[in-house]
Image (cartoon, coloured by chain):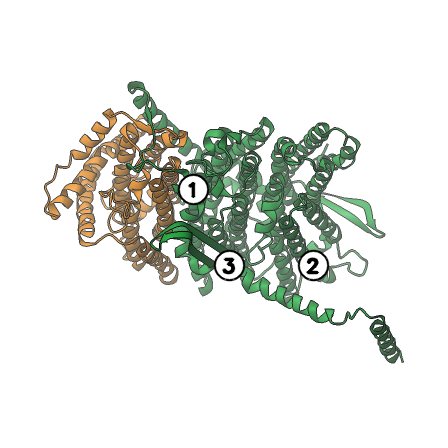
Chain colours: A orange, B green
Amino acid sequence: MTAYSVVMEASQVLILLFAAPAFAGWVKTVKCRMQGRTYAGIFQPYRDIAKLFSKEVILAENASWIFRATPYIVFGVTVMIGGIIPLVCIDLPFAATADVIALVMLFAIIRFFTALAGMDIGTAFGGMGSSREMTIASLAEPAMLMAIFTVSLAANSTSLTEMVRVMGHGAFILRPSLAFALLAYIMVHLTETGRVPVDNPATHLELTMIHEAMVLEYSGRHLALIEWAGMMKLFIFSSLGIAVFCPWGIAASGDVFGMLLGALLLAVKLGLLGLILVLIETGLAKMRLFRLTEYLGSAFLLATLGMLSFFILE
Amino acid sequence: MTPFDIAIASLLLMLSPVILAPCCAKSRQLTIHLSFMITAAASLGVVIAGFLAVRCSINTSAIVLMGLPDLPFHLRLDPLAGFFLCVIGLLTFFVSIYSIGYVQGFAANRSIVRFVVFYSIFIAGMLLVVLADDAFFFLVAWELMAASSYFLVMYEDEKGENRRAANLYLLVAHIGAIAILLSFGVMAGLADGFETFQGYTFDSMRATVYPATWATAAFLLSLFGFAAKAGVIPLHVWLPEAHPVAPSNVSALMSGVMLKTAIYGMVRITFDFLKVFPWWWGGVVLVLGLVSAVLGVLYALMQHDLKRLLAYHSVENIGIILIGLGLSMIFTSFHLPVLAALALIAALYHTLNHAIFKGLLFMGAGAVLHATHERNMEEMGGLIHRMPWTSALFLIGCVSIAALPPFNGFVSEWLTFQAFLLSPSLHRPILSLLIPLGAALLALTGALAAACFVKAFGVTFLGHWRGHHPLQRVHEVDWYMRIGMLLSALTCFALGILPTFVIAWMDPLAQQMTGGRLAASAGARGWMWLTPIAAQRASYSGFNVFIGIMAVVLIAWLLLHRTKAAVHRVPIWDCGFEKINPRMQYTATSFSMPIRRIFGFLFKIREETHAVQPVRHTAYPEKLQYRLRVRDRFWFWFYQPIEDAAYFMARKVGNLQQGRIQVYLIYSFVTVIVLLAFLG
């Protein structure tokens, strides 16, 4: 491992850490604008996180070590994932640590521990959030895996680096299977990052909360870590989608100019994606919990159809 | 000393408590310590023998002059047998240490000797099944294993539930054994040397080329027989009955390793004896595996008995193993040795992993049972404060079985996924349909398993105590039990971060069964990187995942803890309601309610709610009663009709019994007349 690759890896993690709140702020700002509300600017999330870090932690009497360790585990795993996916360059020294399947399971670690933390205090809200989150995830995760499998079949590899190389730098082929996979991925993206129509990141209403219910008892620096990790998750899911379905512009080697161009293109793509996200969120209403079965079922079906069409047509 | 000698010596040592225990029965302490120390030592010997047998690709056989005249017993140690010796030995080692602590508290006033004797015979029986090299000896060992485990399930025979479960278990075990016997019969009948009484040896079965139809008959019979033992759906009904009522250390062994002897049998018969087969055999195994995996985990989600939940997860994991096995068979029939080796290694790796983490989980459940005297999760909660060791170790088991990196369950599931994704177009329309669907169902299984273990851990160990007797009586278990669990947890972790070593070790086995090798490509980039076929296709490094996560966690923790003061502990925020109590928590039943609703069509659900008197007003009842019963549909589809028919027949036959001597004399008379008519 050379010093240059270490610098590259470190800069990728720094991009993730410091661009993620800006992306979350961008989505919020556009959403406010679209819905005719006043907005606090895209830097508001930084101020929120800074404020939470300086606040004291209030902990329930019976909170166990699981409750206290979870924010750190969630944060650690999220940063770890951020070091693996290709953001601006595919030549990452750490990229071989996990392929896409391992990546999906790393997200599962986050969910597993957040759900346990939700049950730790023993209030009805926490348990409710955990139960709902695990139910939804058990339908969303297979859909996510299937969507990614379809791409990996086309790229003949499950390694993200290789997938980006084949899709972005190989010959351009129109594949019907990828269209199915992309649709499924978007649906899963909305689910996993807790957006409307599945969950609402802005609500604290008991009937509709899913993710927020699990982390309701957190405060201070614990909450800051969880919120920050949540923003990074949104960022990672978006850039993972970009890397898999629209990888053009991600630099193949580690030259500085290519990487700067890659970073610029990533910013543009993320900006557009944020816009699309807001359009979906503004256009749809939140679904009832048991309607989600149909929603996620169709995501799963679309992804399986994508894989089937790959096996049959290609 | 060759590995074969070590194996035989350990086997004899394993059987020594049968004689020693009755001799020192006066002192309970001495019996327990001595017997379980001996079985632990013998298990360690078995592990060493098995490890060396696989590593050096040993193939030794011996003839024991026992059994019937002219039909001696044959023994053989080859890489496949060695691998399963390792699986069995490793878990028995952990469980034997655990048992020293567990049996002391568990046995109360029951006879220790009875337990120890059957425990030793049970383990020796499993070892003999793996070592046997002729059909006759195999079946003797198989029955030894089944019968001794029957007595272990029956150990607390004063409970009706236990007797019923044990009888059901014995019944299914024997129906399975008949099918295995018939399968061996078919093969022995076609084998060379049938006339000279040599057809029953595995050697002659191995040397024979079978006609396609008879091979299919032998395969299907053996599949039925072994599926009954392994608890493959729809032959799983005995499993969730027998495993929960057995003593927990026995459940750990039954679930962890006894089921695996069936996997051994399947691999032995299909890959070693029949060798050449059409692809649809693999398809059948794959479909059975998929059905078992998905339904197993869904049934597990509906349980609130901790041990029953774990028992259903065994059905699921056997399903995952069969998925790997089925894929390996499909690849073998298409002559793709490397892929077949990959799928087989995935299946066998999962066999090893499941033995360890399921053993750990059953030991954890046993510790909880030991401490709380409760199997029902709805009566637990908050145990993490009273049992810090058990809860941490149980959590490792949960993380492993939920297939989360960097633990071991993930590695084998990842390899199975790779086998799915590497399958090129096999030019069979059904396979093109089945393989994507299979990958989807495996993904679904993994996600549901994670949900199930959040429920199991969350309801048992987190939140508040829900039980009726005071929490103060609950205590942490002793050091023997903790060490048994700790060693299995460490093994889970080691198998998760060092997969390249395990795969390199298993290479001779893959070579023996499929002709393909994997180790060179799997460890091509050094021990840290697992690259099953090539680094460009897929790579995973459990070690790096672990180090990476730990590093970030440590940095974040150091940065935040240096500057901040201690946290502020306060009572739970009750939204101003002030009467919050433990019964308001989510329970196991409520946790799985959304999944029950989504997949409800798979179960037979009866749900009733009614208000209990006195009612002051219809809208405000004093108390509500809620009853929920979720049952396995398979019982009603397959077993209830058979049970009804058997009962009906018995009633009809019962009509013959009039209880009057004259009638019986007439029966005798008629029988004599009929016989005379035939003879004349």
Q: Nearer the viewer, residue B384 or B141?
A: B384
What residue is shown at x 65% (from left), y 46% (from top)? B153
Q: The disc numbered 1 marks a residue on which chain?
A: B
Q: Are marks 1 and 3 on the same chain?
A: yes
Residue A225 spot, x, y in % from top left: 29, 31
State which quadrant residue A290 falls in.
bottom left
CB under 8 Å between discs 2 and 3: no
What residue is shown at x 72% (from left), y 37% (from top)? B111
Q: Nearer the viewer, residue A106 or B244?
A: B244
Between disc 2 and disc 1, the foreground one is 1
What residue is shown at x 66% (from left), y 32% (from top)? B40
Q: Which amino acid, mark 3?
A: Val
Between disc 1 and disc 3, the foreground one is 1
Q: Which mark is residue B178?
A: 2
Q: Which residue is mark 3?
A: B287
Give the mark nearer the N terminus: 2 vs 3: 2
